[in-house]
């Protein structure tokens, strides 16, 4: 309000001063005489002032016209001017509108529209680092792999877009199954952007598939360094890679180096069963049974496994059954309620012909967890205690369709493996195998177990044994358990 009042007062004062000045000029005698050649101009003072103002305005307009002429000449010459900036802003507006419409078309799945909008954006923007990427995505969406590859190669020429080009070609090679080229491209992309998580994962997977364990350990270390992997997960996976490296060295005929690598793997992850077994066998070969025992006991405490028991038996291979039971207490006192521990105790007592102790150790596993191994042990106990052939055959018939129990199962695709591997044979997943029960197959007949005792009938035991010799995996009777002369627990 006050400022508005001040502006009004100033305006009135200016008008008053101009009026006062004009009055003084009109009352002033004399004037201004201008002679040009033979012409003479006489002007009153007020007229002279008005003429001076008009002259200033004319000069100002002349300067503006001259500036426009200079700008037009520069525009025609290709120099940057206000006129060129105006047209540039118009082109940029149209280009970014086309780019935005192209991105919306990509999101909507309209590949042909995206291609045309990308071409239009390139026409107006002349920024290939933006429009080439849109063109490549549209080409891939439409199935034009050749066009996409050409665009990705153009992106390689610019340092700003080189990583995008390498990554695009790498993904194409992966889809084509060219893992060798894909791994080289992944290494290049990793060198350009070592923090990129997806590139780290792709490179790690390819290195594992190609048995490049040393390179995979470096990549895994980079994942830890840049915060893409928790420290505990890094230790576990580094142990897996160290174990795989040890197996590779063993195949090359360097057992000493392999043992050292296995011991390193066990140090990184004591609960990794294959690492513990390999490290223990390395200690046994070096004549260090106490170290081997310590490794196996620690691994058993984390997760009981038949391979651990088999390696523990190899520490003293020529001991009597009674001595073996006594020595195995170092294992069996841990995880005493675990089914694996109970079956191990049952096996040891069967070997020692102490069938009541074997039945006590086995407990109710044949009823609560009727796996093939538990029922096989029960059949051995029944036979050892003098049960009739009919009773033994009935137990074996139950074992025919019983679950196999824990196996090496891929947690990603549920594929079952006969032995532990660092990479799944089915889905190429890294460190996805776990010792667990495989999921039941769909469409299984639920009454098969109940019907088999009727099918077997009074057939002699020899027929069941013949089925075992024929390789029927579902009816296999664990030879290491049944044979009383065997002095090792089943692996």
Image (cartoon, rainbow, N blue to C red):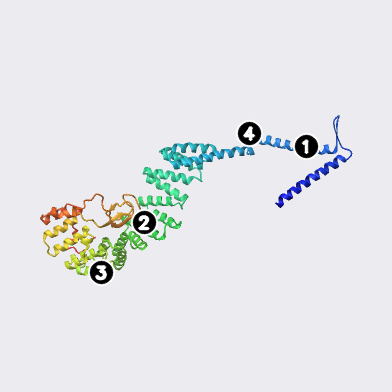
Q: Nearer the viewer, residue 58 or 122?
A: 58
Residue sticking out furthest to the top:
38
Q: Which residue is mark 3?
A: 329
Image quarter of residue 25: top right
Q: Quadrant of the C terminus?
A: bottom left
Can residue 483 be seen in the rendering of this structure? no
Measure the alpha-carbon separation of dots 1 and 3. 117 Å
Q: Nearer the viewer, mark 2 or mark 3?
A: 3
Mark 1 or 3, nearer chain start: 1
Measure the alpha-carbon separation of dots 4 and 3. 97 Å
Question: 451 left or right of 84?
Answer: left
Q: Which residue is mark 4?
A: 76
Mark 2 or 1, nearer chain start: 1
Query: Helix or strand or loop: what does disc 2 sit on?
Result: helix
Q: Which residue is mark 2?
A: 241
Query: Helix or strand or loop: what does disc 1 sit on?
Result: helix
Whether tag 2 and tag 1 are in contact, CB under 8 A, the answer is no
Name the residue rendered at 22%, 68% in the picture: 325
Measure the alpha-carbon separation of dots 4 and 2. 67 Å
């Amino acid at each position: 309000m006050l400022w508005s009042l001040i502006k009004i007062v100033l305006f009135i004062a200016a008008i008053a001063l101009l009026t006062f000045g004009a009055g003084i000029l009109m009352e002033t005698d004399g004037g201004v005489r201008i002679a040009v050649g033979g012409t003479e101009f006489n002007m009153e003072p007020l007229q002279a002032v008005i003429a001076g103002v008009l002259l200033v305005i004319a000069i100002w307009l002349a300067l503006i016209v001259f500036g426009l002429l200079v700008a037009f000449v520069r525009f025609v010459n290709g120099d940057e001017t206000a006129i060129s900036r105006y047209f540039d802003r118009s082109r940029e507006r149209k280009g970014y509108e086309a780019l935005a419409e192209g991105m919306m078309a990509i999101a909507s799945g309209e590949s042909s529209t995206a291609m045309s909008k990308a071409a239009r954006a390139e026409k107006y923007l002349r920024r290939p680092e933006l429009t080439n990427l849109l063109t490549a995505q549209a080409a891939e969406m439409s199935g034009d792999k050749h066009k996409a590859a050409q665009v990705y190669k153009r992106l390689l020429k610019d340092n700003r877009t080189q990583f995008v080009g390498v990554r695009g070609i790498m993904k194409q090679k992966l889809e084509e199954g060219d893992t060798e080229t894909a791994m080289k491209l992944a290494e290049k992309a990793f060198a350009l952007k070592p923090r990129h998580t997806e590139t780290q994962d792709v490179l790690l997977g390819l290195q594992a598939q190609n048995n490049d364990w040393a390179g995979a350990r470096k990549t895994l270390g980079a994942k830890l360094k840049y915060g893409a992997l928790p420290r505990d997960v890094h230790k576990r996976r580094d142990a897996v890679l160290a174990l795989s490296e040890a197996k590779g060295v063993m195949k090359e005929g360097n057992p000493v180096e392999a043992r050292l690598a296995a011991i390193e793997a066990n140090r990184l992850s004591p609960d990794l069963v294959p690492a513990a077994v390999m490290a223990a066998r390395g200690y046994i070969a070096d004549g260090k049974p106490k170290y081997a025992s310590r490794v196996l006991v620690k691994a058993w405490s984390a997760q009981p496994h038949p391979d651990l028991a088999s390696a523990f038996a190899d520490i003293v291979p020529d001991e009597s059954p009674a001595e073996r039971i006594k020595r195995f207490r170092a294992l069996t006192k841990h995880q005493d309620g675990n089914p694996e521990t109970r079956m191990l105790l049952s096996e040891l007592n069967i070997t020692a012909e102490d069938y009541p102790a074997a039945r006590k150790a086995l407990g109710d596993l044949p009823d609560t967890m009727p796996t093939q191994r538990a029922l096989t042990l029960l059949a051995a106990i029944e036979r050892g205690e003098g049960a009739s052939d009919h009773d033994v055959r009935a137990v074996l018939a139950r074992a025919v369709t019983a679950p196999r129990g824990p196996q090496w199962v891929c947690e990603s695709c549920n594929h079952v493996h006969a032995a532990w591997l660092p990479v799944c044979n089915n889905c190429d997943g890294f460190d996805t195998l776990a010792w667990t029960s495989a999921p039941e197959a769909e469409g299984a007949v639920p009454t098969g177990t109940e019907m088999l005792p009727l099918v077997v009938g009074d057939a002699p035991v020899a027929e069941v044994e013949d089925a075992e010799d024929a390789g029927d995996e579902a009816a296999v009777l664990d030879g290491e358990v049944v044979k009383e002369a065997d002095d090792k627990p089943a692996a």
